[in-house]
Image (cartoon, rainbow, N blue to C red):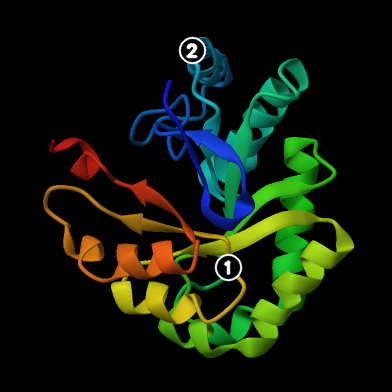
Amino acid sequence: MEKRRLGKTGRMVTAIGLGTWQLGTKWGDPFNHQEAMRILEATYDSGVNLIDTADIYNDGNSEKAIGELLKKYPDHFYVVTKCGRGLNPHVAEGYTPEAMERFVDGSLKRLGLERLDLVLLHCPPAPVYDNDALFAGMDRLKEKGKIADYGVSIEKVSEGLKAMEYNISAMEVIYNMFRLKPAEELFPQAKAHDVGIITRVPLASGLL
């Protein structure tokens, strides 16, 4: 499995990762722990070491299942988790350093880790990208040793360009055959700033 360096994180991750939004479930079905563990074991068997999750996926059960996998293979996986969508996603005022630290503490507990590899702000509203205090708070979480790196999961190219004014190490962006705009300006700027790129919805939610 090909590996690439993920920007400023310096970590070598597989070019293909596992997204865990619906880990072990189908639309509307309850979380299936046994199926989730089969999927995660298959990920390990395939040589994939990059896992993408979020604190809200399956009401926290996604992180808990991944935490079980990490106990079994403690040095294999690089886990990206996201936080912030537990707030009203349209109200920027809720995105405070204190709220983000609470979310990080929750992810640490569910994943069974002392430090998170990479935390992304989970598609926050546009005004958040002008919140200097919030990004300073993320820097403090690094200083405290709760997170190794942080970044953003974005909806718009303009958000990614703005986020690179801060000390982000990586960003997640929709990129597929129907959404090629990021390659025009965002990707070159990310390369210049050594910001790692994680592409989401690469198969256009199954359409491709």
In the rendered view, tell whether residue 102 sits above or below residue 17. below
Please, what is the three-letter code of the amino acid marked with disc 1? Ile
Residue 85 in sight from this viewpoint:
no
Q: Nearer the viewer, mark 1 or mark 2?
A: 1
Q: Quadrant of residue 18?
A: top left
* Residue indicated by mark 2: 42
CA gap between label 1 and label 2 equals 31 Å
Q: Quadrant of residue 113?
A: top right
Can you give x and y, in whole percent of width and height, for residue 78 in the image? 62, 36
Q: In the drawing, does residue 205 fall left or right of residue 160?
A: left
Residue 100 in sight from this viewpoint:
yes
**Quarter of the image that includes the N terminus:** top left
In the rendered view, tell whether residue 35 sits above or below residue 91. above
Mark 2: few/some/many CA within 10 Å (<14, 14-19, 20+): few
Q: Nearer the viewer, residue 112 or 188?
A: 188
Residue at the spot 67% in from the left edge and 57% down from the top edge: 149
Is label 1 in a helix, a strand or a loop? loop
* Residue indicated by mark 1: 168
Residue at the spot 32% in from the left edge and 62% down from the top edge: 187
